[in-house]
Image (cartoon, rainbow, N blue to C red):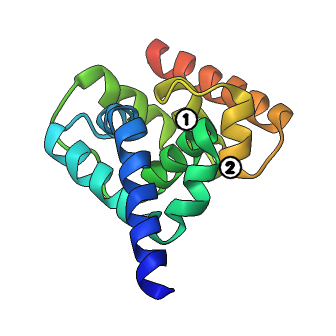
Amino acid sequence: MRVLRRRTDRNALAELFERHAEDVWNHAYRLTGSWELAEDLTARAFHAVRGRSAEAALLGEHALPLLLAVTTRLTRPAPPHDGDRAVLRVLAALADLPRADREAAELCLLGELTPVQAAGALGTTENDVRSAIDRARARLGRAEEE
């Protein structure tokens, strides 16, 4: 039974990776501005969900918000490294936000998730995510004026 479970988990993880690796890498790159860190974070995100890969594979496309949320959490507390200056400016502006607001903004504004998807990944409501995004956008606007 244990051998069968491992094989099923490996197959599920391979399926998840094949389906979502590019999106996870793109999200990691947007968060860090570094190709190398994006590769590392992508591997770490899939490693983090490997024990739950069969469960996540059953989520189908809904596994992506989970993977993006894990990737976002893995970027903390490590600061972003050299890379795209615009992304780094956005991350710096968002850094002072409360954690929930920052994560919602990163998933929706940088990770391009919908508020519904981000809410599912963060375990909150769509309205909370929309409010967080509004606060983040206001913060970004003030940062650009400075």
Label annotation for residue 90: none
Residue in the image at 63% along x and 40% along y:
62
Secondary structure of the residue carrying tag 2 is helix
Residue in the image at 31% along x and 20% along y:
86
Name the N-terminal-most of marks 2 and 1.
1
Secondary structure of the residue carrying tag 1 is helix
- The answer to the question of whether label 2 and label 1 lie on touching residues, with beta carbons closer than 8 A, is yes
Image-based side of 113 in relation to 22, left or right: right
Q: Nearer the viewer, residue 77 or 40?
A: 40
Label annotation for residue 122: 2
In this figure, which residue is indicated by the disc labeled 1? 107
Task: Give amino acid for label 1.
Answer: Leu
Q: Nearer the viewer, residue 56 or 113?
A: 56
Quadrant in the rendering for residue 10: bottom left
**Residue 144: x %, y % from top left:** 45, 15
Residue in the image at 41% along x and 83% along y:
3
Judge whether residue 72 can be spotted in this image.
yes
**Residue 60: x %, y % from top left:** 60, 41
Reply above or below: 120 against 86.
below
Q: CA distance from mark 2 to mark 1?
A: 9 Å
The crowding category of the residue bearing disc 1, from other C-alpha atoms within 10 Å (few below 14, some 14 to 19, many at least 20), is many
**Residue 97: x %, y % from top left:** 59, 43
Task: Give amino acid for label 2.
Answer: Leu
Residue in the image at 59% along x and 28% along y:
113
